[in-house]
Amino acid sequence: MELHFRLESATSNKAPSKNNASVPNEANSKTCETSPPMKKLFTSKKARLIRKQNAVLKTWRKLSLRAAATERRKRKRERKNRARSYTPAIRYCAPEIITVDDPFHRSALLIFLKGLREHYLHHPSRTLLIDFSKTSHLVAGGTLLVYAELNRLITFFSSGVKLRCTEPANERASQVLKQIGIYRICSNQSAVRPVRDDVVHWQVVQGTLVDNSLCAPAVEGFQNRLDLMMIDELLGGLGEAMTNAIQHAYDDVRQDGINYHGEKNWWMFSQAKDGRLSVVFCDLGAGIPTTLPLKRPTLWSRLMHKKPDPTDGDCICEAIIEGKTRTGLDGRGYGLGNIVDVVEHIPSGVVNVYSNRGRYDSRSRGPFDYDDSILGTLISWNVPLRVPQVRGTA
Amino acid sequence: MKINLGSEFGRYPAGRYLSDGPYSGQRFREDFLVPALKDSNEPIEIVLDEARGLKSSFLEEAFGGLVRAGYSADELTTRLTFVTRDPSLVDEIREYIQAQQKRQG
């Protein structure tokens, strides 16, 4: 600073600006009065000072270049370290058809879901990449199971596995994933817009209490295409399914290797397609066959008497039949029976109850067993839209 | 006395116990039915039509639960009347009351 001052002073002494000279301000004149008079420098001294200043500048420049080089080297080292520690995402291929009905595709779906659970258990630090590229068909039941499983994993493992997904090549499948929120869960900024008529009516609801006001908009939204009794029946079935989920499903441990002690969640989808309304409800609890001996010992012992080694399908069937006949009133069942009653009097109405390995289908009115378990309970109602009123009014 | 289930309690009653959810049968019984039965000896008219999705868990806990709370099936049958377009609902409620009475002997 000192050096600059002197040099500037020397320069200004030699060639004072016209303006400064003609309009001296008060401050300048005061400075002139108080500060000692400027010393006139010899040319040789001035040159020496300039040389000195240049030397300082040169040193400063050299130092700053050296610092920049050090910084560059440091950044390069960091980049190398990052590259060394980078682990690629683990890719899980979603099945081509996401369904729980067909045994082959169901197996593929359940293997895929098992993979997701194992990732959260064994690779929590790795990114999970769901590859939907081959997925072309999403059936409501299977899709709800995927949605519920992902939701449960994210809620339980709040530490946060990075979840990503690729988009399906199939446009409709991509729109469905966007509509139901799978892209949002996977932080996928897809530009796809759900516009198809068979996609925009997909609705998702979830909860932890018996509260039909959550599901009502998904069903009552079709009140111009469903008669009042049917809306009543569907909401009643949903209410009973929620009650079962909250009261029974989570009383035993789900056999998935994750010791989940979270909330008693349920999930619901509704979808209107081809003149029919599908309503699907699921919980990821222990399943009816697991909770039946604990919750309904009398029913269980009766079943054991009839069939010493009952399958999961037998358990579901027995619980439904017992519920349907318990009140002794036509169309007024109890518990699971109530859930099936929903479509009892509706021509072409279908209800399916899946729990662990078993399945009850209202069309065959019998049990069916698969090789693998969905590890939970899934109920699916399918009713025609625009049907006449079926029950008498008072 | 008149109780409108749909407009006074909730449009979507479901569930059995208080812990199940906000519109459970137990809550309806404790907050509406029992006080109404205690208040006077007049008949009580319960309007069911504005409520949606009435099923067994709610109905059994609300009305069958009255027998467990100490009211006799006879008294309940005399004092409770129902307004509904679905007569099977009334049969179901009476069935829960009678079944609970039988269970208690």
Image: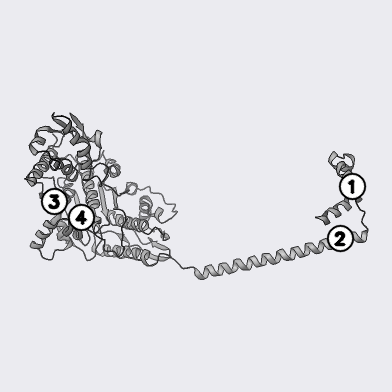
Is the residue marked by circle 1 packed among few (<14), some (14-19), or many (20+) residues within 10 Å?
Answer: few
Residue receiving disc 1: A16
Chain bearing tag 4 is: A
Q: CA distance from mark 1 to mark 2?
A: 20 Å
In this rendering, the answer to whether A93 lies above or below A323 is: below
Q: Residue at x 68, y 65 (%)?
A: A67
The colouring scheme, among rainbow, by chain, secondary structure or one colour, is one colour
Residue receiving disc 4: A353
Residue receiving disc 2: A49
Is the residue marked by circle 3 packed among few (<14), some (14-19), or many (20+) residues within 10 Å?
Answer: many
Horizontal arrangement in the rendering, residue A191 relative to residue A60 (left or right): left
Q: Please state the horizontal and vertical placement of residue A237, each as a whole percent of the image.
A: 21, 47
Q: CA distance from mark 1 to mark 3?
A: 108 Å
Q: CA distance from mark 4 to mark 2?
A: 95 Å
Q: CA distance from mark 3 to mark 2?
A: 105 Å
Q: CA distance from mark 4 to mark 3?
A: 14 Å
| Along the line of sight, the residue nearer the viewer: A309 or A386 | A309
